[in-house]
Image (cartoon, coloured by chain):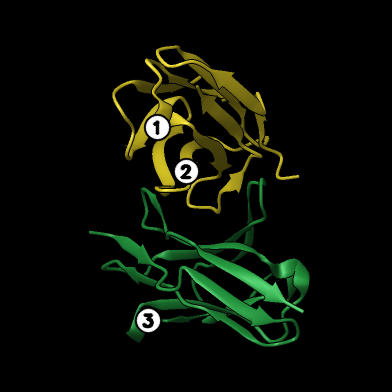
Chain colours: A yellow, B green
């Protein structure tokens, strides 16, 4: 158990819909990272937050957004969903310049 | 631009045989280096990390990795593979503001 929790574990929705994925980092970790993992794209870095502020941006689509709240939990919002958005979404947390600890992931299926 | 290359997409080894997974990175300075393992349907688990000091680092589950600055490599090794080592292995680099992951190497272990 990494100490990072993600909800929900599975999510099935339809094209065009909007979903919110939630992540609670390890106690004391200020950084939260979001990744998308699909069979054809591998593990793709989406976005990083540090203590509530956006720190780095990767291959995140404009339809996707994230935020980190004062209690340090983070949410990833995916809107106007397409079939190609079906993937595993991982959240990770870390202390500054430390290794990342990954959550168990949310499997999103878009039908 | 920073990048991480894992040249072997898939490796098959016999149980009890030795293993080496390759990782090369592209970065101007000495990065922080990591190896992660992912079992099917699971999140990523840290195997080992290199920040500085001794270039041979020991990790969990009997794995070790050697940092070679001249070759920009951080190869993962295990002297005797167990069937439970079958998984996906990811090399990662932290450059000071962002993590970069390789595309992964899938390991199959045959009896």
- Horizontal relation, residue B13 to residue B55: left or right: right
**Disc 3 to disc 2: CB gap under 8 Å:** no
**Disc 3 to disc 1: CB gap under 8 Å:** no
Q: Which residue does the numbered mark 1 point to in the structure image?
A: A84
What is the x, y in percent for residue B93?
A: 42, 61
Q: Closer to the camera, A22 or B83?
A: B83
What is the x, y in percent for residue A24?
A: 63, 28
Q: Residues within 10 Å of mark 3 (few under 14, many from 20)?
A: few
Q: Are marks 3 and 2 on the same chain?
A: no
For mark 2, name the chain: A
Visible in this render: residue A107? Answer: yes
Mark 3 vs mark 2: give the one in front.
Answer: 2
Q: Which residue does the numbered mark 3 point to in the structure image?
A: B69
Mark sitting on residue A13: none
Q: Closer to the camera, B63 or B33?
A: B63
Tell me what residue is drawn at x 58 percent, y 21 percent.
Answer: A12
What is the x, y in percent for residue B110?
A: 71, 77
What is the x, y in percent for residue B102?
A: 42, 60
Q: Quadrant of the N terminus of chain B?
A: bottom left
**Disc 1 to disc 2: CB gap under 8 Å:** yes
For mark 3, name the chain: B
For mark 1, name the chain: A
Tell me what residue is drawn at x 41 percent, y 19 percent.
Answer: A81
Q: Are marks 3 and 1 on the same chain?
A: no
Measure how far apart labels 3 and 2 are at the Cα level.
Answer: 32 Å
Q: Which residue does the numbered mark 2 point to in the structure image?
A: A38
- Horizontal relation, residue A32 to residue B111: left or right: left
């Amino acid at each position: 158990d990494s100490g990072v929790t993600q909800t929900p574990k599975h999510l099935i929705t339809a094209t065009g819909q909007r979903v919110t994925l939630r992540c609670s980092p390890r106690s004391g970790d200020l950084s939260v990272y979001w990744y998308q993992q699909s069979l054809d794209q591998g593990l793709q870095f989406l976005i990083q937050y540090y203590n509530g502020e956006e720190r780095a941006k990767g291959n995140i689509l404009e339809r996707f957004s994230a935020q980190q709240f004062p209690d340090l939990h983070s949410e990833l919002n995916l809107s106007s969903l397409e079939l190609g958005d079906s993937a595993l979404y991982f959240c990770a947390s870390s202390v500054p310049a430390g290794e990342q600890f990954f959550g168990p992931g949310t499997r999103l299926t878009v039908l | 631009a920073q990048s991480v290359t894992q040249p072997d997409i898939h490796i098959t080894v016999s149980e009890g045989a030795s293993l080496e997974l390759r990782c090369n990175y592209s970065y101007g300075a000495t990065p922080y280096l990591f190896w992660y393992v992912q079992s099917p349907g699971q999140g990523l688990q840290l195997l080992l990390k290199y920040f500085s000091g001794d270039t041979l680092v020991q990790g969990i589950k009997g794995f070790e990795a050697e940092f070679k600055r001249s070759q920009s490599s951080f190869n993962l090794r295990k002297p005797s593979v167990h069937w439970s080592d079958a998984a996906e292995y990811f090399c990662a680099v932290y450059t000071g503001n962002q993590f970069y992951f390789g595309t992964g190497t899938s390991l199959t272990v045959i009896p």
